[in-house]
Amino acid sequence: MVVLLRMPSDLPIDPEAFKRFEHTGWGEVAHNYHDSFGRLTTQAVEPMLDASGVGEGTRLLDVATGPGYVAAAAVRRGARALGIDFSSSMVAEARRLHPAVEFREGDAEALPFERDTFDVVTIPFGLLHLARPDTALAEALRVLGPGGRVAFTVWDAPRPPSGSF
């Protein structure tokens, strides 16, 4: 049985407490992420890169990079990719798995980059783990150059297929 619980948007949320909660959690599970969720989350990597037009020479920022799957796949396509995550443990895991790719610690809500720096910003399964997703999306748009694209994935409840067969 799957139960989808949606929190009312009018509930007060302390963004800093939420951020601390997420930061602590990701610090504790980083070393298990690849074995626990890797097969599941990597299924979305190539479709995300295809949808956002990532190829040779694309300047890509992978926000909430986690273990760095999207950034690493982008580099394999010839992109210039950089992964950023607020968890030092996840950054260490990404560096361990993909030593040829650049990863940094950083905050999705305050990206340390100038305007017009990237062609694509990806946020793989990270948006719902951010205290202020609207701020993170605004930051993603800020660092994009003209014609830039943002691509993200989020978890959702399984649903039966719609339409007829």
Image (cartoon, rainbow, N blue to C red):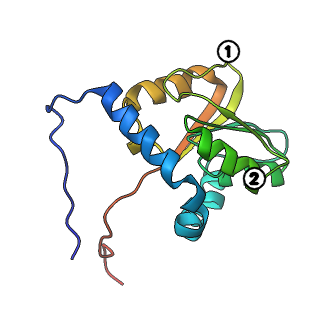
Work out whether 24 lies above or below 5: above
Q: Secondary structure at mark 2?
A: helix
Task: Locate the N terminus and report the quarter of the image it occupies.
Answer: bottom left
Image side of residue 100 versus residue 162, left or right: right
Q: Nearer the viewer, residue 66 or 147?
A: 66
* Residue found 82% across the figure and 54% down from its top: 76
Q: Is residue 71 visible?
A: no
Which residue does the numbered mark 1 point to in the structure image?
A: 114
Assess disc 1: are there few (<14), some (14-19) or many (≥20) residues with their C-alpha within 10 Å of its C-alpha: few
Q: Nearer the viewer, residue 108 or 145?
A: 108
Q: Quadrant of residue 39?
A: bottom right
Q: Nearer the viewer, residue 116 or 71?
A: 71
Q: Secondary structure at mark 1?
A: loop
Q: Amino acid at mark 2?
A: Arg
Q: Amino acid at mark 1?
A: Glu
On residue 96, the disc is 2
* Residue found 65% across the figure and 42% down from its top: 91
Work out whether 137 lies above or below 53: above
Q: Quadrant of residue 60?
A: top right
Assess disc 2: are there few (<14), some (14-19) or many (≥20) residues with their C-alpha within 10 Å of its C-alpha: few
Asked if labels 2 and 1 touch by Cβ distance under 8 angstroms, the answer is no
Residue 73 percent across, percent down from the top left: 74, 55
On residue 23, the disc is none
